[in-house]
Amino acid sequence: MGLKEERAGPDDGVAGGRTRLEGDRTTVTDAGPDLGGEPEGGRLAQELAGVADAYGGSGPTMLHPTRTDVVVLRRGEVVVKAHSRRDDVESLRPRLRAVASAALSGVMLAPLEREVLSVAGRAVTVWPAGRPVAHDDPDGAPWEAGARLLARLHAVPLTLVPALPAAGGPARVARAVRRMSGDGPVERLVRRVFEELPGPEPLLPGLLTHGDWHLGQLVHRDRWLLIDVDDLGVGDPAWDLARPAAWFAAGLLDPAVWRRFLGAYLASGGPALGGDDPWQRLDLPARALTVQLAAVAVVNAEREGRELDEVEHALIESCNRIVRA
């Protein structure tokens, strides 16, 4: 039985349309609170503000809060991102050059600076600001635009971009599971599903893949564009469709929205899915993303000292259905 058949139905207590518009980490475009925080963070923010000034930033300076060690600062129309300390700078460089290339023009947001900068020992990239997806308007979310952009991304020949590392999707799943520190029944359930995931199919040819797609990876600058190069690389493009597939299977994404998204991808010639049944290709990535989202939910709830909310419970129940199947 595949994940499609395990999908939560209307009687499972989770209403369709409650999908989180963001992923398990934040995007680079939302303005956050005024500068402040710990002295080290304040010094880094000041240096990032100086970088923004050098690229034409002006006006109020805002920090965008994240749940990781990523630091994102916006100054006017310029966004400066200090990447995670765990990110490999040597892998980041070709990714940045790829999105700056003509091959991805109109698909991914191009940086203001083609090279990775070093600021206070952190890898830093510089971007134009864009309007993100509105978190308070799920019905107006650009699902079709996102699907069409993914189809275009996946169709870009690898010969047109610099040699890229593996896309980061599978590694993100393992990293999320490792971050769980507890050993309660929920943590054991998530770890069990992760351990029972089959390995990827070895003969599938790799295509250009975003590696961490969700609605928070879209910004509007005259048109919708993809953002975030951190996991861009060569991989299985079905992983880019796996997060909404996992939401759908958990009963968190309205079936009509899922059909719109999937239909737009297929109508645009997206190469990730073959045959009559898209779940032949989506089932494993969707299971993996269910594990990732559930693990992130557990970590966040523990960090914030709260119980799992309704959406997070739905992800855990989806893991439970995978085990029962």
Image (cartoon, rainbow, N blue to C red):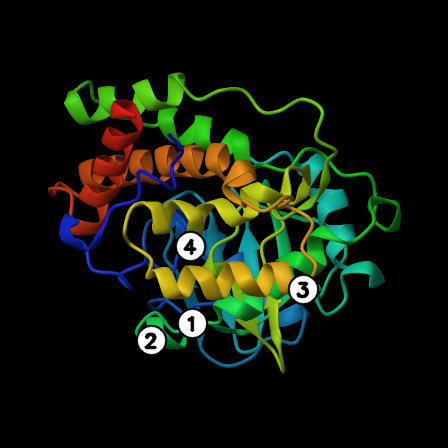
Q: Tell which tag, 4 or 2, sits nearer the viewer.
A: 2
Assign a secondary structure to mark 3: loop
The disc at residue 26 is: 4
Q: CA distance from mark 2 to mark 3?
A: 25 Å
Q: Is residue 188 above or below residue 138?
A: above
Q: Is residue 230 above or below residue 100?
A: above
- Return the residue at label 1: 141
In front: 47, or 227?
227
Residue that appears at 74% across and 33% down: 205
Q: CA distance from mark 1 to mark 3?
A: 18 Å
Residue that appears at 40% across and 43% down: 68
Asked if the residues shown at circle 2 and circle 1 are in contact, with their CB atoms under 8 angstroms apart, the answer is yes
Quadrant in which residue 191 is drawn: top left
Indicate which disc, 2 or 3, sits on the residue closer to the N terminus. 2
Report crowding for label 3: few under 14, some 14 to 19, many 20 or more residues within 10 A (C-alpha). Answer: some
Looking at the rendered image, the quarter that the N terminus falls into is top left
Looking at the rendered image, the quarter that the C terminus falls into is top left
Assign a secondary structure to mark 1: loop
**Place of residue 177 in the rendered image (x, y in percent of width and height, measured from the top left):** 36, 26
In front: 230, or 201?
201
Q: Specify whether 292 is left or right of 123.
A: left
